[in-house]
């Protein structure tokens, strides 16, 4: 006589909680990867408030006056054309990564170009230590 239990143990494992965790990790890494910049090496100036801004367009000016727009190195004369093509017909966010040893005239020039294209201009800084 074969006796069978009415209560069978379920041996299946639910993967829904694991997929939720993987999905949240994926979103976290996608969001934080946009805050990392790989442009020219720039020694940023310090300020009391250094907040993180979402970077649509990044303009970098290094100590030796090399210019780059979105990690593409170019001559100073081509920065206006590059910004106008990237910001064509929309109000964008331009983040300036300008070395603290670069003369202010370059900061004003690049900021003026971006402002003329109706972009919001932000200067990247590092916090005081």
Image: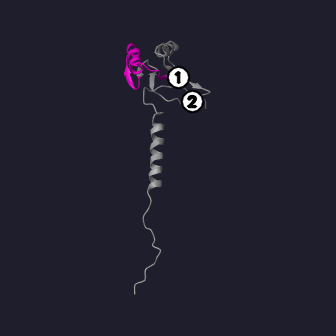
First reached walking from the N terminus: tag 1 or tag 2: 2
Residue 80 location (% of width, % of height)? 41, 14
Q: Can you name the residue that lies furthest to the bottom here?
A: 1
Closer to the camera in the image, 85 or 61: 85
Quadrant of image for the N terminus: bottom left
Query: Callout 1 environment at 10 Å: few (<14), some (14 to 19), or many (20+)?
Result: some
Number of numbered discs present?
2
Residue 18 location (% of width, % of height)? 45, 54
The image quadrant of residue 72 is top left
Query: Callout 2 environment at 10 Å: few (<14), some (14 to 19), or many (20+)?
Result: few
Residue 93 within the segment the image draws in magenta: yes
Question: Pointer 1 and pointer 2: residues touching (CB < 8 Å)?
Answer: no
- Residue at x 52%, y 29% (from the top left corner): 53
Q: Which residues are magenta?
A: 69-97
Residue 86 within the segment the image draws in magenta: yes
Between marks 1 and 2, how big is the CA–CA gap? 10 Å
Q: Which mark is residue 74?
A: none
Residue located beneath label 2 in the image: 51
Q: Can you name the residue that lies furthest to the right here?
A: 48
Quadrant of image for the C terminus: top right
Residue located beneath label 1 in the image: 122
Secondary structure beneath disc 1?
strand
Secondary structure beneath disc 2?
loop
Closer to the camera in the image, 121 or 8: 8
Closer to the camera in the image, 37 or 6: 6
Residue 96 location (% of width, % of height)? 49, 22
- Residue at x 53%, y 22% (from the top left corner): 122
Residue 69 location (% of width, % of height)? 41, 22
The image quadrant of residue 49 is top right
- Residue at x 52%, y 14% (from the top left corner): 104
């Amino acid at each position: 006589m074969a006796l069978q239990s009415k209560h069978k143990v379920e041996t299946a494992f639910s993967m829904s909680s694991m997929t939720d965790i993987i999905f949240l990790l994926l979103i976290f890494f996608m969001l934080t990867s946009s805050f990392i910049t790989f442009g020219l090496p720039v020694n940023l100036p310090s300020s009391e408030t250094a907040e993180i801004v979402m970077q649509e367009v990044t303009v970098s000016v290094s100590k030796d006056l090399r210019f780059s727009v979105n990690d593409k190195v170019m001559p100073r004369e081509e920065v206006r054309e590059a910004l106008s093509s990237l910001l064509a017909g929309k109000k964008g966010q331009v983040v300036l990564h300008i070395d603290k040893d670069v003369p202010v005239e370059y900061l004003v020039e690049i900021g003026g170009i971006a402002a003329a294209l109706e972009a919001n201009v932000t200067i990247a800084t590092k916090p005081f230590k």
